[in-house]
Image (cartoon, rainbow, N blue to C red):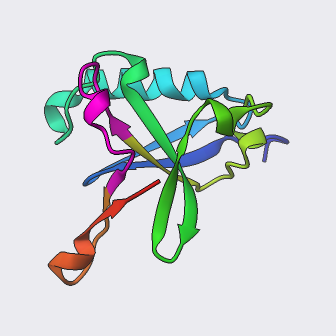
C-alpha cells in the first residue's frame, strides 16, 4: 500500500451518485474542475442540469449524521485549508453537490437535495439544509 493512498470520495446530488479517486493533497479547485469535466462529458446520462462553468458547482460537507445534513463549503470554511485532507475529508467521505448555474444562484436556497434509498417515499428524498 502506498504511503499516501488516494481518497475515494462519494459525491451526491438528488439521485445521482458519483465516485472520484483523488490524492489527499488535492485542492478543492481540482476537485471542482474534475467534477465539472465529469458532469459535462456525461450529462446526457445524468438527471442533473449541466453546469455552465466550474463555479456553478456548490459543495456541502457533512454537518450532522442523524439525519445526514450538509453545510455549504465556502471560502470561510476553507480558510487555511487548501487540500482535501486539511479540510478533514477522509477516504470514503460523502460530499453533497448542487449545480447552480449563473442566473439561478439568486434562487438557490442553500440546501443540498440528496435522495437516499429507502422503503418508503418519505425516506427516499431528503432536503439537506445549511
Q: Is residue 41 toward the left or the right of residue 72 in the image?
A: left
- The x and y percentages for residue 68 are 47, 68
- Splitting the image into 4 quarters, where does residue 79 fall? top right
- The x and y percentages for residue 55 are 43, 20
**Foreground: 51 or 21?**
51
- Splitting the image into 4 quarters, where does residue 2 fall? top right
Q: In the image, what residue occupies the spot 28% across and 24% down?
A: 101
| Tag count | 0
In this picture, is 20 found above or below 88?
above
Q: Is residue 103 toward the left or the right of residue 28 in the image?
A: left
| Residue 89 on the magenta span | no
Q: Which residue is farthest bottom?
A: 119
- The x and y percentages for residue 18 are 38, 45
Q: Which residue is farthest front?
A: 106
Q: Is residue 52 toward the left or the right of residue 67 in the image?
A: left
Query: Magenta span covers which residues?
Result: 98-113
Q: In the image, what residue occupies the spot 24% across and 20% down?
A: 103
Amino acid at each position: 500500500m502506498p504511503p499516501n493512498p488516494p481518497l475515494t470520495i462519494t459525491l451526491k446530488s438528488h439521485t445521482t451518485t458519483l465516485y472520484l479517486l483523488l490524492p489527499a493533497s488535492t485542492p478543492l479547485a481540482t476537485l471542482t474542475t474534475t467534477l465539472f469535466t465529469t458532469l459535462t462529458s456525461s450529462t446526457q446520462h445524468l438527471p442533473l442540469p449541466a453546469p455552465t462553468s466550474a463555479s456553478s458547482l456548490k459543495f456541502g460537507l457533512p454537518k450532522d449524521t442523524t439525519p445526514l445534513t450538509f453545510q455549504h463549503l465556502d471560502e470561510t470554511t476553507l480558510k487555511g485549508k487548501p487540500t482535501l485532507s486539511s479540510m478533514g475529508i477522509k477516504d470514503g467521505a460523502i460530499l453533497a453537490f448542487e449545480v447552480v448555474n449563473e442566473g439561478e444562484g439568486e434562487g438557490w436556497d442553500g440546501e443540498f437535495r440528496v435522495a437516499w434509498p429507502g422503503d418508503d417515499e418519505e425516506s427516499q428524498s431528503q432536503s439537506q439544509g445549511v
